Image (cartoon, helix red, strand yellow):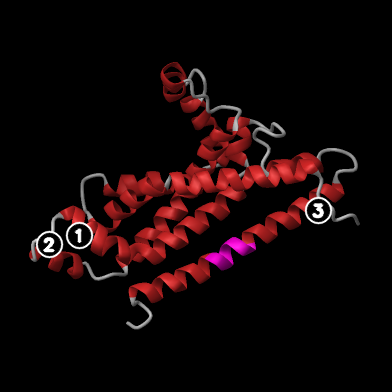
């Protein structure tokens, strides 16, 4: 068994890392806002927002990919506007793969941050407001530090989920080597061609290894974040 990784396999790995990083970090601000809304506010449509956020977890990924194609494709509602105004095209390139991965990973990110915030005493934020702190200062000096363990966990989980995204990606941006072919798509491609078993096995091992590293990093960083915020002492 030859374990040397070919240039095509390295290309798929580097593209997966690029897509995963963009998908997780670009969706972080929106994830923070949604997690805070769901954890701290009660409003008309709260249940609907929660259901929409978690919808990618329960519908087939192909459905998500088709919805993204209709919305962000060259003739889609957002895609046509982005291309006409900014010259941006999302379908059939890595930017579309990052959007698909972000949508599929978003529920995990929001859930981790929401649970982290819900486990904290809202009285701390109320006390800060009573002492005259404005909402922005309360959020950045009290709420955000309290959410830190959940933010770290959510980011790493979203990154790991983005690395493994397949169905929505192949439906939205296809399987184009060097452009949209991430690790899962390359692995699928090698399983469909004669003599591709060795490459498929190497990519499978790579995928498992990267995912394990991400999950262990999540556990370590979340523990460090809890130590910094004083949760361990509590």
Q: CA distance from mark 1 to mark 2?
A: 7 Å
Task: Give me the disc on residue 129.
Answer: 2
Labels 2, 3: front one? 2
Residue of label 1 = 138
Q: Residue sitting at 45 percent across and 69 percent down?
A: 222
| Mark 1 element type | helix
In the image: residue 118, left or right of residue 227:
left
Q: Position of residue 92 (x, y in %)?
A: 61, 28
Q: Residue at x 61, y 32 (%)?
A: 171
Q: Which residue is mark 3?
A: 201
Please provide the residue range marked out in magenta. 212-217
Tag 1–tag 2 contact (CB < 8 Å):
yes
Looking at the image, residue 25 sits to the left or right of residue 201; the answer is left
* Cα distance in 3D space between marks 2 and 3: 56 Å
Q: Can you say which quadrant of the picture contains the C terminus?
A: bottom left
Picture coordinates of residue 83, whole percent (x, y): 47, 20
Mark pair 1, 3: CA separation: 50 Å
N-terminal-most mark, 2 or 3: 2
4 left or right, relative to 39:
right
Position of residue 150 relative to residue 183, above or below, is below
* Magenta stretch: includes residue 43: no
Residue 43 visible? The answer is yes
């Amino acid at each position: 068994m030859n374990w040397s990784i070919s240039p095509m396999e390295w290309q798929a790995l580097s593209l997966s890392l690029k897509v995963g990083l963009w998908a997780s970090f670009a969706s972080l601000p929106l994830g923070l806002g949604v997690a805070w809304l769901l954890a701290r506010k009660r409003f008309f449509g709260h249940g609907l927002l929660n259901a929409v956020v978690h919808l990618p977890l329960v519908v087939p990924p192909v459905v998500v990919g088709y919805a993204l194609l209709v919305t962000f494709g060259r003739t889609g509602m957002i895609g046509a506007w982005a291309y006409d105004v900014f010259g941006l095209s999302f379908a059939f390139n890595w930017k579309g793969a990052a959007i698909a991965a972000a949508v599929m990973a978003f529920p995990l990110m929001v859930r981790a941050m929401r649970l982290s915030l819900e486990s904290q005493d809202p009285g701390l934020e109320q006390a800060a407001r009573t002492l005259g702190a404005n909402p922005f200062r309360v959020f950045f000096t009290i709420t955000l530090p309290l959410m830190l363990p959940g933010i770290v966990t959510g980011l790493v989980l979203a990154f790991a989920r983005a690395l493994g995204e397949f169905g929505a990606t192949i439906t939205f941006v296809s399987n184009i080597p060097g452009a949209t072919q991430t690790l899962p798509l390359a692995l699928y491609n090698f399983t469909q061609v004669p003599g591709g078993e060795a490459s498929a096995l190497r990519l499978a091992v790579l995928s498992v290894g990267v995912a394990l590293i991400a999950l262990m990093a999540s556990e370590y960083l979340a523990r460090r974040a809890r130590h910094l915020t004083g949760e361990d002492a509590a």
